Amino acid sequence: DLVADPRLQLQLGDRVTVVGSEASIANVEKFLGNSLKRLREPNLISIFIGIALGVLIGSIPFMFPGIPQPVKLGLAG
């Protein structure tokens, strides 16, 4: 645990615990964001689009010189 200090720099993935009134916590949440809330509510549309694009790209055959059969990435990509 680190104490707040003017020289302290937050890094990506750092967790911050805020103690105070609800209004103060809401102000800090506006400034820093609330990734835990975002993680509990995933954006399913982007996940499904990614899966669909992966299936489509995996089914495209690539021809290489010297190989008689086309090569595909397949579903595992």
Image (cartoon, grey):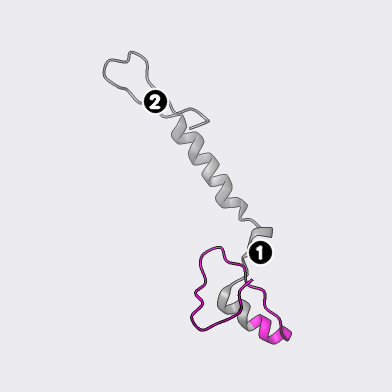
Q: Residue, x 64% and y 56% (percent of image)?
A: 42
Q: Is residue 67 above or below residue 55?
A: above
Secondary element at image label 1? helix
Residue 53 percent across, percent down from the top left: 48, 40
| Residue on which the image places disc 2 | 61
The amino acid on which the numbered mark 2 sits, given as a three-letter code, is Pro
Q: Residue furthest left?
A: 65
Q: Is 8 positioned to the left or the right of 39 in the image?
A: left
Q: Position of residue 25 (x, y in %)?
A: 67, 81
Cα separation between marks 1 and 2: 41 Å
User: What amino acid type is highlighted by mark number 1?
Assistant: Leu
Q: Give yes or no for residue 52 being in the magenta stretch.
A: no
Which secondary structure type mostly characterizes the magenta part of the structure? loop
Within 10 Å of disc 2 (Cα), the crowding (few <14, some 14-19, many 20+) is few
Question: Could you tell me if the residues under marks 1 and 2 are in contact, i.e. CB atoms within 8 Å?
Answer: no
7 drawn magenta: yes
Span colored in magenta: 1-26
Q: Which mark is residue 6?
A: none
Residue under label 1: 36
Mark 2 lies on a secondary structure that is loop
Dividing the picture into quarters, in which one does residue 48 lie? Answer: top right
